[in-house]
Every structure is written in structure tokens, then in C-alpha cells.
Amino acid sequence: MKTHSHKVRHYTGRVGWLRAAVLGANDGIVSTASLILGVAATQESRGAILIAGVAGLVAGAMSMAAGEYVSVRSQADTEQADLERERRELSIDREGELRELAQIYVERGLEPRLARQVAEQLTMHDALGAHARDELGLTELVRARPLQAAFASALSFAAGAAPPLAAAVLCPRSWVFPITSSGSLVFLAGLGAVAAGAGGAPLLRAALRVTFWGALAMGLTALVGRLVGPVV
């Protein structure tokens, strides 16, 4: 007889790193390209454009890492505080916590007697884990991971900033503006499609959404550079 393994592909486990990576790469492309285009619109030299691009890459990567770490660390602290509170409540009133857990299962559709049995079995196996999962909604798949988010954001920002910076380095001065802007839009569309594919979302909608907002940001920054440059 043949046995068939049933493997279901879920995307929830990718939420933490995927969100940070997509945000970092998108910000890297948009902010670095916008900065390069804004300086290029002022008719500054290639040296000034490259300095702006490199400074934007380094500052942006560090800013993304610090921001993600602080944000996700705050989330992790809140989760830990909730777990500590549940641990204290289990040590003080285990029966009350058992009734609370059983009531959760009743509200999800189980009969009271079966809900009580399920609650008792899960409490015997891992009381804190049961309350974390079913009362607080915390699982290993969605737990906050500050360092993972920080590294993913910094690396993805640098990766996103690299193409527009490379265009500014390799292209003749007169081609910096068109090549950087068009190339960045292509990379943004590809990023949106890849992120949507990794998360199981529609590809075209995500690509268009990312490209639109990126084009808007770059266009406004270039306009500001064109208007302010002659004055400065």
C-alpha cells in the first residue's frame, strides 16, 4: 500500500522576516533613487551625486536596523509581559485559568464537556503554551524577533539601494537621471512581484502598487531638487 504525505504550504511563518525584508528593500530603492535623482536634478557634479547615494545607503541601512529593532523589541517586551502575567495567574488560580481556557474552546464551537477535557489535557501537557496560543494568540510562528527583523531590514535596505547607486556610478552624468529612474521602477516592480509570490498574494496588484508609490516619491524629490537647486 502506498502512503501519501500531506504537506500544506502556509505563509504565516514568513510574516516576520518577509515584512522587514520587503520594507527594507523597498525603502532602499525608493529613498536612494530619490536622493540621487534629487541631487542630479540640481545639476550637481557626479561626485556630489555619488556622495549623496553612498551616504543615503549607509544612513538608511542603519536607520532601518535601529528602527526595526526598537519597534519589534517593544512588541517582544509586551509579549513577554503577557506571558509573565499568565504564568503568575496559573500559579495563583490554576482552576480559574482552566475554566477560562475551556470557555475559549466553547466559544469556538466545542461542547462544554469536551471543551473541559481538551483544556485539561492541554493544561497537563503545557499550560502556559496553551494559554499563550489560545488566549493571547502567541505562537512560535508569529513571535516577535527583534534581531532578525533588524538584520533583515539593514541587509535588504542595502540590497535595494545598490541598483540605483550602481546606475549612478556606471552611467555617464547625462544618463544618470533616466537610467536611475527607469531602472529603479523596474526593480520596484520586481520586488513587489517577488514579495507577493513569497506571501501568496496576487503578483500584478502588488507590483503596480509598489511601482506607483515609488514613482511618486522619486518624482516629487526630483521636482524639489529642480526647484530648490537654482536657489541654493
Image: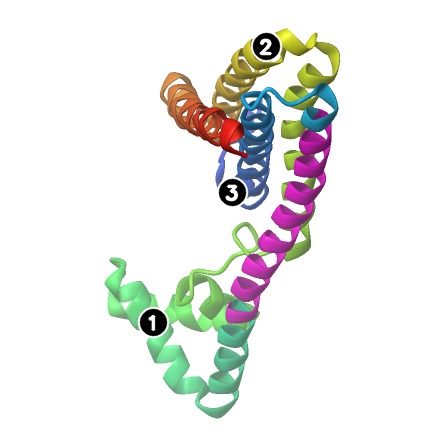
Image location of residue 4, percent across then percent down:
55, 25
What residue lies at 40% left-to-right and 28% top-to-bottom? 213
Q: Residues within 10 Å of mark 1 (few under 14, many from 20)?
A: many
Q: Quadrant of residue 40?
A: top right
Q: What's the magenta region?
A: 50-78
Q: Amino acid under label 3?
A: Val
Residue 2: image tag: none
**Sequence-earlier tag: 2 or 3:** 3
Task: Determine the secondary structure under disc 3.
Answer: helix
Mark seen at residue 15 = 3
Q: Residue furthest bottom?
A: 92
Secondary structure at badge 2 equals helix
Viewer-nearest residue: 230 or 137: 230
Residue lying at the far front of the rendered structure: 231
Q: Nearer the viewer, residue 110 or 43?
A: 43
Residue situated in front as seen by the camera: 18 or 133: 18
Could you say where residue 143 lies in the image, as x and y percent from the top left?
55, 56
* C-alpha separation, residue under disc 1 versus residue under disc 2: 62 Å
Q: Which mark is residue 102?
A: 1
Is residue 221 visible from the viewing direction of this image?
A: yes
Distance of label 3 from label 1 (alpha carbons): 29 Å
Q: Which of label 1 and label 2 is nearer to you?
A: 2
